[in-house]
Amino acid sequence: MGLPRQLLAEALGTALLLAVVIGSGVMAERLAGGNVALALLANTLATVGGLYVLIEVFGPVSGAHFNPAVSAVMAWRGALPAGALLPFIVAQLAGAWLGALLAHAMFDMTLLQASAKLRTGTGQWVAEAVATFGLVLVILRAPASRVAAMVAAYIGAAYWFTASTSFANPAAVFGRMFSDSFAGIAPASAPGFVVAELLGAALAVAMHRLLGGPAPASGTKATHV
């Protein structure tokens, strides 16, 4: 596929992913009546379903990364041309921001926002490293025909077993900074999350090499929120 088409797929896919994450969080919070566990469950189910569909739809076009950490890993492995890495990341970040705007527009919210939701501390950072480690390891080792289902299932589980609710994606962190909603993250908390995610991705690459075995044929097909 030509690079412009791939960038369009990455931007559109990331925008729709962030619209799913943020929009379902807004809807869940409004309908849950103050029950945070119920709101998180609804947010999780919507994200799992949306993520699976988006990987299947955009995977054949761009690999459905929607995630700078995943794109960096694929570039390091040679599955993504090095010259395409920066354009991929720019497309993902732009898409994440547009996804936040789209979610706000659908719920008649102020379009331009900055989140005030602090997410910080050692536990949160360890959780993000673990979430991204698991995500990248699944992407690298999942059978080609099961990548979408396994990634979606892992993220659904990680929403609940990680203290951070598993962002596992620098683009998701970026987009969610611009939403003062259930799924938001304060800009001051973003750097710690991104550093932890990149560390988790690097550790996953190292573990993949230690475990050995052939890489999935679909090398570039994977994502996250």
Image: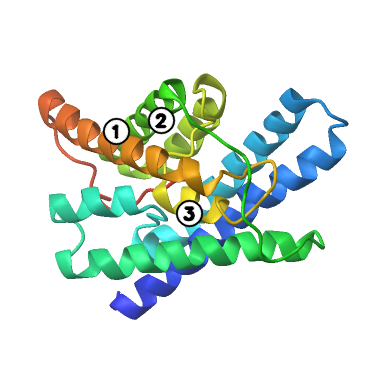
Q: Secondary structure at mark 2?
A: helix
Taking the spot 51% from the left edge, 29% from the top edge, the residue there is 164
Q: Are marks 2 and 1 in contact (CB under 8 Å)?
A: yes
Lower sequence index among marks 3 and 1: 3
Lower sequence index among marks 3 and 2: 2
- Real-space Cα distance between discs 3 and 2? 17 Å
Bin the neighbour count of mark 2 within 10 Å (Cα to Cα): few under 14, some 14-19, many 20 and up: many
The disc at residue 200 is 1
State the residue in front, 173 or 23.
173
Q: Is residue 50 above or below residue 208?
A: below
Q: Give, as a three-letter code, the residue at label 1.
A: Gly
Taking the spot 45% from the left edge, 44% from the top edge, the residue there is 190
State the residue in front, 211 or 19.
19
Q: Secondary structure at mark 1?
A: helix
Bin the neighbour count of mark 1 within 10 Å (Cα to Cα): few under 14, some 14-19, many 20 and up: many
Which-is-in-front pick, marks 3 and 1?
A: 3
Q: Give, as a three-letter code, the residue at label 2.
A: Ala
From the image, tell me which residue sits under label 2.
131
Which-is-in-front pick, marks 3 and 2?
A: 3
Q: Is residue 159 above or below residue 16?
A: above
- 24 displayed left or right of 87: right
Residue 115 % position (x, y): 62, 49
Q: Are marks 3 and 2 in contact (CB under 8 Å)?
A: no
Q: Give, as a three-letter code, the residue at label 3.
A: Phe
From the image, tell me which residue sits under label 3.
174
Q: Is residue 18 above or below residue 117?
A: below
- 103 displayed left or right of 89: right
Taking the spot 48% from the left edge, 54% from the top edge, the residue there is 174
Residue 207 % position (x, y): 18, 27
State the residue in front, 175 or 66.
175
The disc at residue 33 is none
- Real-space Cα distance between discs 3 and 1? 18 Å
